Amino acid sequence: MSTYNENAKPKVTAARCREMKRKGEKIACLTAYDYTMAQIVDAAGVDFILVGDSAANVMMGYETTLPITLDDMITYAKGVVRGAKRAMVVVDMPFGYYQGCRDTAIESAVRIMKETGAAAVKMEGGSEIRESIAGVLSAGIPVCGHLGLTPQSVNKFGGYGIRAKEDAEAQRLIDDAKMLDEMGCFAIVLEKIPAALAAKVAAEVSVPIIGIGAGSGVDGQILVVQDMLGMNRGFSPKFMRRYADLANVMENALSRYVSDVKSVDFPNESEQY
């Protein structure tokens, strides 16, 4: 049973995230894609729930995040928002709904906010999507940036390797992070970059830096909940710690159910009306 008291801390907002950085309080983040998981994640005390476009992988079975649509993201986010009471819910802007067009970005973000009740959106990229970010911010919508490995750019990168190892790319990342800070983003996710670089960025910007594969010198951490709970087999990057082995637990429970049904052990007399 959870010992976390959801009334012990105020509801997390974009302003609260900035305050947490100022106070040196680490920000715990996880993904969620449905009402039931959102309730559990929220009750555990997570500060920031991301309805990630990683739903394309873990919920829909695609190899990349690219196929997921805005309607898909809105559907997943609706359930998460209903399940989260304290945590801030942030929704990924999916590929193709903000790159290259400020008006499309605003329209997509407004739909997310109006139809889901989420608190913010997340957008991948730096200077190349500056106008889109500016447009969304101008609509009064909080934006979380995302730099480093940006999965929506997998075809440009040619894979999911570590980013910003070379000096030139590292400097671009620093410049982009400072730009996002100055523009008014409330947080930035840094994915799969050298730990020393992530710590440097965290020290040089005023907004919280949330790391995934970016070391411990940042302001918070995020993982995909199915990964850290051990529900996904065969995915074990260096940065990912498994806190449970739910795939085996669930498979064993389901196998017992199948066995009980076939042997007519379930339902027994006490389980009937």
Image (spheres, helix red, strand yellow):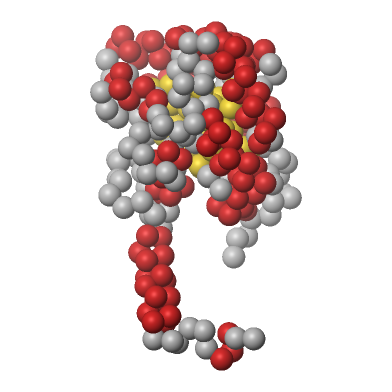
User: Can residue 31 be seen at all in this image of the molecule?
Assistant: yes
Residue 80, quarter of picture: top right
Camera-nearest residue between 261 and 235: 261
Which quadrant: the C terminus? bottom right
The x and y percentages for residue 115 are 67, 33
The x and y percentages for residue 270 are 59, 89
Q: Is residue 237 above or below residue 259?
A: above
Q: Residue at x 60, y 50 (%)?
A: 35
Which quadrant: the N terminus? bottom right
Q: Residue at x 59, y 23 (%)?
A: 108
Q: Is residue 21 left or right of residue 125?
A: right
The x and y percentages for residue 93 are 53, 26
Q: Residue at x 37, y 66 (%)?
A: 251
Q: Is residue 233 above or below residue 91?
A: below
Q: Is residue 123 above or below residue 73?
A: above
Q: Given the current orientation, which residue lies at the most extreme bottom position? A: 269
Q: Residue at x 43, y 87 (%)?
A: 264
The x and y percentages for residue 193 are 35, 26
User: Can residue 42 be seen at all in this image of the molecule?
Assistant: no
Q: Is residue 107 left or right of residue 214?
A: right
Camera-nearest residue between 237 and 261: 261
Camera-nearest residue between 222 and 97: 97
Residue 148, quarter of picture: top left
User: In the rendered picture of this protein, how many numbered marks are placed on residues?
Assistant: 0
